Image (cartoon, rainbow, N blue to C red):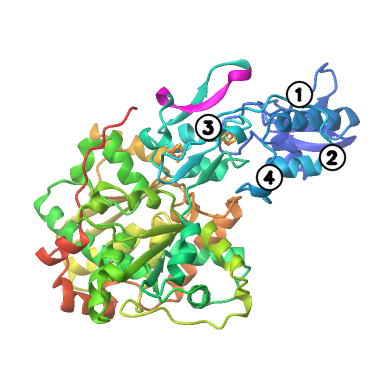
Amino acid sequence: MMIKIEVNNRTVQARKGETILSALGNCGIHVPTICSMAELSPTGACRMCVVEVEGQEKLVPACSFPVSEWMKIRTHSPRVLRARKTNVELLLSNHPDDCLYCERNGNCELQKLAEDLNVRDRRMRGRKSKLKSDHSGYGIIRDPEKCILCSRCVRVCEEIIGVSTLDFVNRGSNLKIETAMSKPIGFSNCIDCGQCLINCPTGALIEKTEFQNLDHILDDKEKITVVQYTPAVAVSLADEFDLKGNADIKGVMNAALRKIGFDYIFDSSFGGDVVVMEQASEFVERFGKKSNLPMITASCPSFVKYIEEFSPDLISNLTTVKSPHQAMASLIKTWFTKLNHIAPEKVFSVLITTCTASKYEVHSDESLKSGDRDIDAVLSTRELIRLIKLNGIDVNKLETEPSDGPFHATTSAGKLFAVSGGEAEATVRSIYYLIEQKEMPEPRMNKFRGSRDVREVSVETKQGEIRIASVSGLKKAMKILEEIKSGKREYDFIEIMVCPDGCVGGGGQPIPLLESDIRARIRHVYEIDKNETLNAAHKNSAVRKMYEELARAPWSKESKLLLHTEHEEIKVLK
Ligand code: SF4
Ligand code: SF4
């Protein structure tokens, strides 16, 4: 029901029950806020969004105060502006002064507020906190001195991810954010999704970087440097450098990476095609025997870590296929080196991905089983952008270049891994082909697409009906998994991505990660699939060649050794 309110002497419409902040947003009035986020419960903690409401003695936080009929609101009165400025000054009073060296310099929300509210001198000096930064994790670094206690990380971790790694401890001036039992984050139950990091307004949560060492490696004539990039990175780069009109973003990326100095450049979507071939074959066998169903995808390293830490009873339901980039990395160290007469130990293998959990994945016991890491360094999309800028590359002026063989042939199936629902859609195309020995009549399945967090599809085959679900966001997935365990839901195959919307919304993406950017990236991925005639992994001629020359056949003894892994329980404090 719509009601009328008065904002700055102008009558506007608002929905009954919505917050003042939401109503102001709908009528185009910007009020600053730090702690508020659309999908999270309001706290009113930062008090940056305070407004004057007639009849209220004190200023009220717009993010948690509901509108009422004919409420009279002033959003930018002198009293309001003074209060906001004081709030920023208080936050700055004990904040470190090292903005120039901070990871978030230039896109820190606190810095921007100070600028917008014209904070030009230091009127207040608080006691600087002396909290140590925590470098114990592989993906995330915590720097509590820069924390402004907005609680976004706490709420994201609890309300969207569902693992509740972070929480407030102590009171008053000793209030701070900690993990359970104040363990270092590397020893906590954190699954390295990076969603806290991407939502932190300051440099209090940043990724662990391997960026600094790369210079020396690229300079080392003894090393053969290879780089692979995941499909979600390419579509994100298009946004960052405004390349949307350029159809061949991948070609631009290849050229940029060669300019940076990499010897060989690969598109990880080849690995996606290989994963589809392997898990489609694994599924057909499991489905025929009705064993360990539903089979659950394991391409999301955060989700695998979650299962190993929180739900080891489901480990046997995970597919044993490696993630696309790990499968690709195995093929680089074996097939690629063999074809090019390169000693595998000379190869320095870099992964560029949207996923902070991959930084953990390459160090995990599973990845180290063979005694050697197949991936030597992981860079996020953010780090790639920095690398491009550092090297003074104008991507808009680059001529496109192809990626390197033997992985140059890709299909749109491998690219669909960038979005939630995409891996399931790509795998179903090949499952159908394996069972029916013919292509799906309608391979592009709209039911896997769109913004819902759970999508269900059923496909009729000679071996019976296959019930498939794709779930985006771990909190939702936890509920679905519980319902499966209690028999309330039944599926044969499930794709789960921890980050909402999948890898395009990953913790390694440029900050801020806007909803409109995510939607644009999703559209871009489906556009690629629409325009691609090679839309199924089993149509990839280079993948067929790889099996002929190296792994014999999907789900064979040889391919299991090369492309599959084992998952094991991890004991952590919960
Ligand atoms: S770590 Fe970042 S997101 Fe978390 S409370 Fe501190 S400033 Fe806010
Ligand atoms: S990385 Fe993910 S799981 Fe870890 S603390 Fe942040 S939101 Fe929670």
Q: Earlier in the sequence, mark 4 or mark 1?
A: 1
Residue density around tag 2, few if under 14, some if 14–19, many if 20 or more, within 10 Å = few
Q: Please report the residue visible at 30 percent of the width from the left and 65 percent of the height from the top.
A: 329
The residue indicated by pointer 2 is 120
| Tag shown at residue 132 | 3
Q: Earlier in the sequence, mark 2 or mark 1?
A: 1
Residue 335 quadrant:
bottom left
Q: CA distance from mark 4 to mark 1?
A: 31 Å
* Residues at circles 4 and 1 in contact by the CB criterion of under 8 Å: no
> Which element carries disc 2, helix, strand or loop?
loop
x%, y% of residue 71?
81, 26
Q: Amino acid at mark 3?
A: Lys
Q: Amino acid at mark 1?
A: Val
Q: Earlier in the sequence, mark 1 or mark 3?
A: 1
Q: Earlier in the sequence, mark 4 or mark 2?
A: 4
> Which element carries disc 1, helix, strand or loop?
strand
Q: CA distance from mark 3 to mark 4?
A: 18 Å
Q: Quadrant of ligand 1?
A: top right
Q: CA distance from mark 1 to mark 3?
A: 35 Å
The residue indicated by pointer 4 is 99
**In the drawing, does residue 438 fall left or right of residue 226?**
left
Q: Which residues are magenta?
A: 173-181
Q: Examine the rendered structure and indicate whether residue 297 appears above or below residue 16.
A: below
> Which element carries disc 3, helix, strand or loop?
loop
**In the drawing, does residue 170 fall left or right of residue 83?**
left
x%, y% of residue 253?
50, 73
Q: Earlier in the sequence, mark 3 or mark 4?
A: 4
